[in-house]
Each structure stands twice: as C-alpha cells, then as structure tokens.
Image (cartoon, helix red, strand yellow):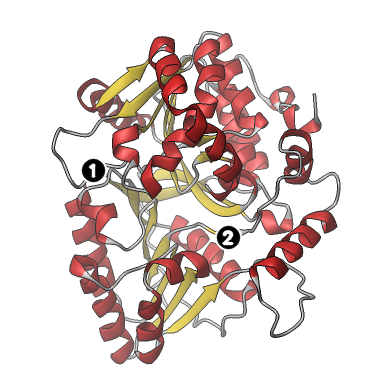
C-alpha cells in the first residue's frame, strides 16, 4: 500500500453526523478553507433557465466582470454572452477573462482575438508551472515530449501523482497541468460557478449544473479568481466597490480550491473526507470515471460498510458527444472493481433518434441527504492531481434533499443501472477500445 492509499479517517468523528461541528471542522482543515454563513444560492440545473441567469447577471454589471472558463464560443446563442462582455467593456466596465489555452485554441481560436480587440483583458493560460529550458524555434512534437518527460522527472519523488504514475502506469507519460475552474463574479457581489463552459451544448442539450451565489462567499470566490489572475501575469484588478450583502437566514457555504501545480489537492482531500463521513448514502454525478487509488478506496470502503453508493455517468450513447465515447471506454476500466465492491453505477441514456445527445457533464456529490457539493471536480485523475478545481460545500439539508430527489428521479427516468452481466458483455465487445483508453485517460 502506497501513501496515496492512506486515508484520513483518523480525523473523522465516526459517531457524528456529517453536518456536526466536529466533522465540518475536519472538512475545513482538509479544504484549507472555512465555513462562510449568510449566503443565498440558486441551483441552476435547467439549461435554458441557467442561460437566462448568465445573461441577466452579465447585464447587471456596473463596474467589473471577472470570468474564468475552460473555453468559450461566440457562435449561436452563446454569442449573446460574448457580445455582452464586449458591450460592457465599451461602457467602461473592467472585464478580465481567464481561458485555458489548449481547450480554447482547439475549440474557437478566433474568439480570444475578438475579446482582445474589444479591449478586454484576457489571459490565455497554458504550460502551467513548467520550468522551460527548450530552445527557441524548436517546438516540434518530439521536443514537447522530451520537455514533458524532463518536467515529470523533476517532480519530487514523494509527489502523489508521480508515485502513482510510476507504480501503476510504467511511466507511460503524457502530462500537463491545466485550469479547469469555471466562475463569473460581477461587481464583487454576485456570482455563478459550476460545470458549464460558454458553449451552447452546456446550456441547451447537455445535463449540467451551475450555482448562482450572493453573499459573503462571493468575496471568497473573487479571491480564488485573483489568485489565478495574479499568478499568471494579469494586470492589477480594480478593487470591488461593493460589499456583498449578508443574508441573516442564509446558507453556510465552503469554497474549496485545488491548485495541483503547487502541490495543493484540497478538493480530493475534502471529497474523500466527506465520503468517509457518510453513514447512509453517497450519490455522485460525474461525466466519466478515471479513479486514482485514493478516490477508489473512499468509494469502495463506503460501500463495504453498508453505505448506498450510486454514481451517475455517461453511457456509450451519450458519450458520443465527446471524442467518440472515449470517456465511456475510460470509465469501463473502473467498473469491475466498483461493482464487485457494491457500488451502483448508472448510465445516462439517450432517447432514440436524438442527434443532440444529453451528455452528463454535471459534477455533484450528495452525502446522506444533508451535505451537498457542486462545482467542477470529476471523478478523475486530472481533477485530482493535474487540474485546478472549485467545489462548494453547501451545508443545507433542505437543498441537499431537493437535489437528492432530482438525482433519484434521473436514475428512475433517464438512466440504466449497470450489472456485472452488462459489464462483461461490454468488456468482450470493447476490450481493444478499453485498452487504448487506458493510455489516454490522463487526458481526461
């Protein structure tokens, strides 16, 4: 057993509810964060309503817009969001945007240039934390691979990701860090964060979740944006002129930010800690499964102690929305261990004849119908060790129960429960694809 497999259960309060003060203080420590009371939250899990909320929030800006996304596109209906950014910049609103470079250039390279021409401050972030020593003018694919290998070997031996790779993957390497957080902060007083990027699929036919926020937690989200903005060379940001309203009967939230290029894996630690605290139920939505040992152990041990662990992910059909279902073949490699351990896996189904498939992109964790966490973290190696992520712990049993009811309704009406016979049949048919997927899972 490697140190990656060592659980933090020694710190939990095993006889107490997950919402007990003792357990929440443990999650504070694992998150390197704190509980923030007095907030208002709306869950945006209906695509068209979420899109309208994005429109309204952007239009409300008077002084500043801070936006971070994996990528954005200025075509079809999402062009309206881009046009509002341009209009607000023309009106004198300070607009700052962070985009992940390789995803943006792969999806919509000209959008970046259009934002720059509109006077918007844009950071296109890539090659995070990589101490470069490549020769100028020699940017071939071979030099890139050699550079990645050099970076990997320069990591300290005790780094979790490096040890896992050497132990499990025989150093079959393709590695880069990336920003994966999504956030919008307007005037320092309202915000939207979650799983959606700014492209039509996320709003109009995929299944995804954002949350709209008001209250003092918005200040914490603004600090998360500023950390990224300052670290990657952004110009000084204007000070938000507004103090967010505190809601006397509001909800307590905790923001957890992970930044793996500096060795900060807070979301992995926090979520494993929360799963360790579960007594009855753990319900998770994740677009695919590429589990590092720590997450796998948390889930299988929960099932072993009698917790009802259910995971909703994509089927072969819905997975066709992204890279010919590669994510599904990656997930299949993890099904057998989970199923044998008693974890229930459900695959989101596609209605017959649908051309625009309802790809499950939501990232949601519900513990015992009391604790809810929503954000950008997938059940994956990249979310655990290579990509920055944001998750919000929501300490509100009534909201957790609402989301749990929606989750169970999805399982009943839109999902198929996978059994070992199903898996064995798929394994026989897709064994070659699963073997290929193992070599590519580090990209997911």
The residue lying toward the viewer, choosing from 383 and 426, is 426
Counting from the top left corner in percent of width and height, residue 2 is at 80, 29
Would you say 342 lies left or right of 419 here?
right
Where residue 216 appears, as percent x and y from the top left, is 45, 58
**For residue 55, which quarter of the picture?**
bottom left
Toward the left, the furthest residue is 353
Reply above or below: 137 against 274. below
In the rendered structure, are the residues bearing label 1 and label 2 in contact, judged by CB atoms less than 8 Å apart? no
The answer to which quarter of the image holds residue 213 is bottom left
**Residue 180's x, y, as percent?**
51, 57
Instruction: Indicate whether 200 appears above or below 355.
Output: below
In this rendering, the answer to whether 60 lies above or below 190 is below
- Distance in Å between CA atoms under marks 1 and 2: 27 Å
Q: Percent from the top left, x then y, of residue 301?
A: 61, 16
Residue at the image position 37 percent from the left and 83 percent from the top: 115
Badge 1: how crowded within 10 Å, few (<14), some, or many (20+)? Answer: many
- For the residue pair 334 and 436, the one nearer the viewer reads as 436
In the drawing, does residue 205 fall left or right of residue 196?
A: left
The residue under the point 45% across, 20% down is 428
- Residue on which the image places disc 2: 178
Judged left or right of residue 29, residue 203 is left
Work out whether residue 78 or residue 32 is closer to the camera in this orientation and state it. Answer: 78
Q: Which element carries disc 2, helix, strand or loop?
A: strand
Q: Residue at x 58, y 47 (%)?
A: 382
The secondary element bearing badge 1 is classed as: loop
Q: Is residue 21 visible?
A: no
The residue at which mark 1 appears reads as 357
Q: Nearer the viewer, residue 214 or 380?
A: 380
Residue at position x 24%, y 54% in the image: 203
């Amino acid at each position: 057993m490697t140190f990656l497999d060592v659980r933090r259960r020694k710190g939990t309060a095993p006889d107490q509810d997950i919402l007990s003060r003792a357990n929440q203080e443990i999650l504070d420590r694992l998150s390197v964060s704190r509980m923030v009371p007095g907030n208002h939250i709306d869950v945006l899990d209906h695509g068209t309503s979420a899109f309208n909320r994005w429109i309204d929030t952007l239009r409300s800006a008077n002084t500043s817009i801070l936006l971070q996304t994996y990528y954005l596109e200025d075509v079809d209906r999402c062009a309206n969001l881009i046009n509002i950014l341009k209009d607000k910049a023309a009106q004198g609103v300070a607009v700052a945007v962070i985009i992940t470079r390789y995803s943006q250039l792969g999806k919509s390279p000209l959008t970046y240039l259009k934002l720059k021409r509109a006077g918007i401050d844009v950071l296109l972030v890539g090659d995070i934390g990589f101490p470069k020593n490549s020769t100028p003018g020699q940017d071939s694919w071979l030099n890139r691979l050699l550079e990645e290998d050099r970076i990997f070997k320069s990591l300290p031996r005790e780094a979790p990701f490096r040890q896992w790779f050497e132990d499990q993957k025989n150093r079959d390497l393709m590695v880069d860090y990336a920003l994966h957080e999504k956030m919008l902060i307007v005037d320092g007083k309202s915000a939207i964060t979650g799983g959606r990027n700014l492209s039509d699929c996320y709003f109009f036919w995929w299944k995804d979740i954002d949350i709209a926020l008001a209250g003092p937690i918005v200040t914490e989200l603004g600090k998360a944006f500023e950390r990224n903005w300052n670290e990657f060379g952004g110009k000084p940001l204007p000070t938000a002129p507004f103090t967010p309203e505190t809601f006397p009967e509001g909800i307590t939230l905790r923001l957890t930010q992970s930044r793996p290029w500096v060795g900060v894996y807070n979301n992995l630690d926090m979520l494993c800690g929360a799963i360790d605290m579960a007594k009855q139920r753990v319900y998770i939505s994740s677009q695919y499964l590429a589990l590092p040992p720590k997450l796998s152990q948390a889930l299988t041990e929960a099932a072993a102690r009698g917790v009802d662990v259910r995971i909703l992910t994509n089927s072969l059909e819905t997975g066709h929305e992204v890279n010919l279902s590669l994510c599904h073949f990656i997930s299949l490699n993890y099904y057998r261990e989970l199923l044998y351990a008693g974890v229930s896996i459900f695959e989101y189904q596609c209605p017959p004849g649908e051309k625009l498939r309802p790809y499950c992109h939501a990232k949601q964790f519900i513990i015992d119908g009391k604790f809810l966490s929503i954000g950008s973290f997938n059940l994956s190696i990249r979310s655990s060790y290579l990509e920055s992520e944001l998750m919000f712990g929501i300490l509100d049993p009534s909201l957790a129960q609402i989301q749990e009811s929606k989750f169970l309704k999805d399982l009943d009406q839109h999902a198929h429960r996978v059994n070992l016979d199903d898996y064995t049949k798929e394994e026989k048919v897709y064994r070659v694809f699963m073997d290929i997927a193992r070599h590519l899972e580090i990209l997911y």
